Amino acid sequence: MSAASEKEVILLADDLIITKTDGRGQITYANRTFMRITGFDEISVLGKPHNIIRHPDMPRGVFRLMWKTLASQREFFGFVKNYTVDGGFYWVFANVTPDMGADGKLKGYFSVRRSAPRAAVETISRLYAGMREVEARHGKAEAPDSSCQWLQDELSRQGAESYEQFVIELNRRQPASTLALS
């Protein structure tokens, strides 16, 4: 992957990025939209950890919240900033769902990502900046839980019941971008 750049890829309103991972987070499937937007080819991603596209602007606390949600066998909704292969980035509204087998055992995870409304990105970027500040003040082990708690406290101050409720409402308020890829 190239060094980080300020080049943003804007998803079209009807773009759906779909991936599937095994229970350890290794990519087992990626659709053509994922490959077009990220610039990765299939051989480069299959069998690799899904976090190869994780952007450093993403607070670790968001992923802590995601894994706690998934561990309780509930689906996770959230805004995520990811890397492209050339060091650019893109924002999505993500839905991650546990894939349970007929025997009730976890097989892996499905993730469907859509275009993130611009106003939602602006709002969530400010919250994520606050989380990163909290993480910078704590040791590596405490940082995700500390920023997750800060986020929950901040959302409570804003009247939100939960991160999930907040992001779903934020996503509903604004229409997704219809700009072409840049």
Image (cartoon, rainbow, N blue to C red):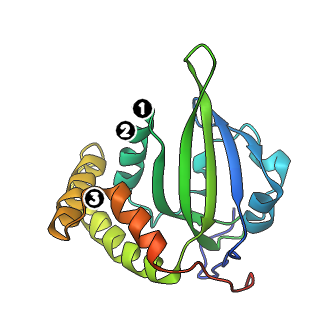
> Whole-percent x and y of residue 75?
48, 43
Image-quadrant location for residue 137: bottom left
Res 137 seen here: no
Amino acid found under the numbered disc labelled 3: Glu
Amino acid found under the numbered disc labelled 1: Ala
Q: Quick one: label 3 or label 1, which is nearer the N terminus?
A: 1
> Whole-percent x and y of residue 139?
24, 49
Q: CA distance from mark 2 to mark 1?
A: 5 Å
Q: Which residue is mark 3?
A: 135
Secondary structure category for the residue under label 2: helix
Instruction: Give the crowd class for mark 2: few <14, some 14-19, many >=20 residues within 10 Å.
Output: few
Q: Which residue is mark 2?
A: 68
Instruction: Give the crowd class for mark 1: few <14, some 14-19, many >=20 residues within 10 Å.
Output: few
Q: Residue at x 54, y 46 (%)?
A: 96
Q: CA distance from mark 3 to mark 1?
A: 23 Å
- Mark 2 in CB contact with mark 1 (< 8 angstroms): yes
Q: Which residue is mark 1?
A: 71
Tell whether 55 sits left or right of 164: right
- Please state, as top left, top right, bottom left or bottom right, where the C terminus lies in the image: bottom right
Tell whether 109 sits left or right of 158: right
Q: Look at discs 3 and 1 and give the one toward the viewer.
A: 1
Q: Quick one: label 3 or label 2, which is nearer the N terminus?
A: 2
Q: CA distance from mark 3 to mark 2?
A: 18 Å
Amino acid found under the numbered disc labelled 2: Lys
Q: Residue at x 37, y 78 (%)?
A: 123
Secondary structure category for the residue under label 3: helix
Q: Residue at x 45, y 83 (%)?
A: 119
Tell whether 27 sits left or right of 71: right
Q: Residue at x 28, y 55 (%)?
A: 162
